[in-house]
Image (cartoon, rainbow, N blue to C red):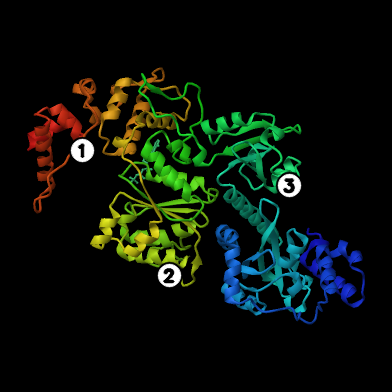
Amino acid sequence: MENPLFSVEGRDLRVRDARTAFFEEGTPADTLVPVVGPVVKSWSRCVQIGLDAHVPSAKDIGPVSETQLREIRDRNAFLLSHARGVLSHLYEQIRSTGSVVILSDSNGLVLEGLGDPDFVNRADKVALKAGAQWGEGQRGTNAIGTAIAEQQPVEVVGAEHFFDCNAFLTCSASPIFDAAGQLLGVLDISGDSRSYERHTLGLVRMSAQLLEKRLFEAEFGRELLVFFHPRMEYVGSLQEGMLAFNQGGELLGANRCALDLLQLNRNMLGKVDFGMLFDQPFGMFVDRSVRDPHALSSLPCRHGERVYARMNLPAVLVPPRPVATPSPAVSAPARPRKPECTEGRVGFSCLDTGDARMGAAIRRATRMVGKDIPLLILGESGVGKEMFAKAFHEAGPRRAAPFVALNCAAIPENLIESELFGYLGGAFTGARKEGYTGKIQQACGGTLFLDEIGDMPLNLQARLLRVLQDRVVIPLGGAKPVPVDISLVCATHRNLVDAVKTGAFRQDLYYRVNGLTVTLPSLRERDDIRAIVANIITIETDGMRDITVSEKVLEFFERYGWPGNIRQMHNALRVAVALLDDDETVIDSSHLPEELFAMESDGDELLDKAEPRARRIEVAPLQGAESLETIERRAIDQVLEEEGGNVSAAARRLGISRNTLYRKLGRM
Ligand SMILES: Nc1ncnc2c1ncn2[C@@H]1O[C@H](COP(=O)(O)OP(=O)(O)OP(=O)(O)O)[C@@H](O)[C@H]1O
């Protein structure tokens, strides 16, 4: 059974008694502190500055002007840009509880508030809105002001508020500090005191920690970040220590957990280096992280304990891998290891395998990381656009939040709308009873990846544009706008500029999605095919088998046209790995799909004669409304002529097997 001393009623009683004792009987605050904690200390401060609990302060000035608010918001742009995702996430947790989520600056001025409309009206009456000031000096004891004064999370419920007029509120607030320990602002949830929930303070505290983590990662995004904890399962959690080092190993920043775990003082930042904290050379730890970015290492601390640690290298610092030079064969690593690159978790470092164009695309995108500028990825189908988008997400401060992908070409036109915007229960016939949270909302705080955006129907382009402009989404069947905080990445294999010219794609949307464009090279244009082969084998074997690819196959891979790009090569190698017997370790032509090599008849012959990479086939312009068959026939005739009637060479350039070419010639 609940201890009555800690029940809501018990607390009310204690506060009422304490109020009488403090305000009417003049009992000193010290005597009452053990009873009502930091609240009574705050009452005492308020009395000292001349506030009267029954008369709202003369200093209770109204909200600042719009111009002042804009200036203050500009000054807090760094905090605001990283807080929006956390605010909307927090709001999702407390939606329909009649509360508001508030972010204030370090003086208690409300920068932003998100709330249930019913409560927002009441909250407005006590000025719980943007521009209002909730420092203790203006509003007496309240969670925002008292959290600032106490520099710690605080809950102020009902009559604990200094002014009688605020006694209908329950507020929980947690301060937000930057990496230097400076107070940046306060996160708060306020609601009607009858809806008091004892877990709210914990929720606010955790959200403030999450925000501090994002701010830390953004502030030191270009440095080497070490995440650690004595317990392995805590690495990646809100309790992990975070350290930022420059390339020389000097400690530039540390979060509060790291300072506690390493028994460090904040003023030691900039004065100690990696070697003074851990009993391992900095270079050795960096090298290991380059080889395997997701690996957890056990690091001995100088003060005795061991911790588990992982390092995040900014992509700009990851040394490009050597360009693949021809070797007898590429092999998956001799010693089993976990793959650096998996389809689920991808870093830029594992995509940067030596191709100059890919490397340039990665460097350009890296400069945009954390800036919330929309990225548009162009490239043929299967070149790795989605993997690139994931790596972009993983490189940024939103990596802990979801990466949500929607392929606009893969789902029927009438479903894109509900998939993207979501719907309320019963919004249309066939809708789920409980409704559906659309992809835009699912991606809140994280990244929304719209694949094949060029295939989005025009009417939905207009709706998407509105979402991107207004930063709110209204689910189908709903009326209430839901705030949206997403980083947007789009991809297409279409020429969007042409689509804009023909009216198939809205120009205004094109400018919205095209903050930075990167074009990924097709596989046949790449110089690092061997490195990609090694990557794929590592992914397919989970790094646990020592498999090589014969030199003949590799040379063929380097010459083949790969119309389906990396996806086609990935599929071919997936089959090859599956076809290997347990005692086989070399992939040769017999393990590859027939359509790739026409293996049964002339596979090795083809490999032997493999010629330099397939050249571009320039087909003469279309003549009127030609059928696909006629165009194909003209292409075949033209290539055969250019190759002097050599069927093998023509088949290679066309990217089909010799047998298929014979079949096509026979059919025509
Ligand atoms: N650098 C790489 N190393 C290994 N595999 C890769 C690499 N890049 C892409 N792949 C693989 O290629 C396949 C296609 O990648 P992805 O889906 O990212 O391409 P895409 O360009 O988005 O394709 P589409 O245009 O058809 O949507 C996936 O199986 C992926 O695992």
Q: Within 8 Å of ligand 1, the CB of disc 2?
A: no
Give the CA separation, mark 3 to mark 1. 61 Å
* Most distant residue in the top direction: 583
Q: Residue drawn 37% across and 30% down? A: 533
Where residue 250 appears, as percent x and y from the top left, is: 65, 38
Instruction: Specify whether 3 is left or right of 233.
Output: right
**Mark 1 Cα shell of 10 Å, populated few (<14), some (14-19), many (≥20):** few
Q: Residue drawn 61% across and 68% down? A: 72
Q: Residue drawn 64% across and 69% down? A: 110
Where residue 132 appears, as percent x and y from the top left, is: 65, 74
Where residue 108 appears, as percent x and y from the top left, is: 69, 67
The quadrant the C terminus occupies is top left
Q: Nearer the viewer, residue 530 or 181?
A: 181
Q: Quadrant of residue 527?
A: top left
Q: Where on the image, by quarter, is ligand 1?
A: top left
Circle 1 is placed at which residue position? 616
Residue type for callout 3 = Arg
Circle 2 is placed at which residue position? 477
Circle 3 is placed at which residue position? 266
Q: Nearer the viewer, residue 245 or 331?
A: 245
Instruction: Specify whether 50 is left or right of 177.
Output: right
